[in-house]
Image (cartoon, helix red, strand yellow):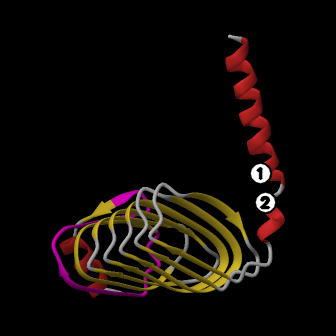
Amino acid sequence: MKEKQGTTTNKRRYWKEIQENITTFQNVEEIQLRSCCNLHINLVANKLKNIDMNNCVESQISVKTESIERMKLEDNKLTQFKLTTNKSSDICIEKCENFKIEIEANNEQNVDIIEGNNIEFKTKCPINKLTIIESKEVSIKGNEKCKSLKVVDLQSMKMMLNQRELSLNQLKNILKYH
């Protein structure tokens, strides 16, 4: 019993030290993650400009930054990604499977989902442009402030706006009148 308590205390101390030293990465400008597996990152980086994540499996990434210019997430599987920022521009999600992404930002986003399979996209900010191309099972949760939506060859989509679930046909009817 004493051994377990010692291990738990050491783990808590270890994680506390990591959280206290999280400011170590304040000056990082670019993150490139390639062919990673079981990666867990919780990062605060105020000077971050680009995120490029390619071929990662079973990973959980959480990034907080002031602004980001470009984010490309390609060929990732069984992965969760969360971005919290004041300003970002273009987000490209390409060839991802079983992928969950959550965005919190103060400005409008441009989002492209290309050849995705089982994508869950949550946003707490307005979407300026949402493009979905050749994708299956896309679920989008967000607010109603989407200005432009382009869907090309989508097999299954659910969209949740202000706690109201919409099918693709309902969404098309709403967009006709706006």
In which quadrant of the rendered view does residue 3 lie?
Answer: top right
Count neighbours of disc 2 (C-alpha within 10 A) and say few if under 14, some if 14 to 19, many if 20 or more.
some
Q: Which residues are magenta?
A: 143-164
The reply to whether residue 20 is in sight is yes
Return the x and y of residue 163 as percentages of the image width and height: 41, 57
For the C terminus, the image quarter is: bottom left
Residue under label 2: 22
Q: Residue at x 66, y 86 (%)?
A: 49
From the viewer's perspective, tell me whether residue 30 is left or right of residue 163. Answer: right
Count neighbours of disc 1 (C-alpha within 10 A) and say few if under 14, some if 14 to 19, many if 20 or more.
few
In which quadrant of the rendered view does residue 70 lie?
Answer: bottom right
Return the x and y of residue 119 as percentages of the image width and height: 33, 66
Q: Residue at x 63, y 67 (%)?
A: 63
User: Which kind of residue does numbered mark 1 sit on?
Assistant: Ile
Give SS at disc 2.
Answer: helix
- Taking depth in this image into account, of 156 and 4 the one nearest to the observer is 4
In which quadrant of the rendered view does residue 24 lie?
Answer: bottom right
Pointers 1 and 2 in contact (C-beta within 8 Å):
yes
User: Which kind of residue does numbered mark 2 sit on?
Assistant: Ile
For the N terminus, the image quarter is: top right
From the viewer's perspective, tell me whether residue 178 is left or right of residue 36. Answer: left
From the viewer's perspective, tell me whether residue 33 is left or right of residue 35. Answer: right
Return the x and y of residue 159 as percentages of the image width and height: 32, 66
Residue 18: image tag = 1
Give SS at disc 1.
Answer: helix
The reply to whether residue 159 is in sight is no
Q: Quick check: is 35 in the magenta stretch?
A: no
Work out whether 107 lies above or below 80.
below
Return the x and y of residue 123 as percentages of the image width and height: 49, 68
Q: Quick check: is 150 in the magenta stretch?
A: yes
Q: Residue at x 80, y 37 (%)?
A: 13
Q: CA distance from mark 1 to mark 2?
A: 6 Å
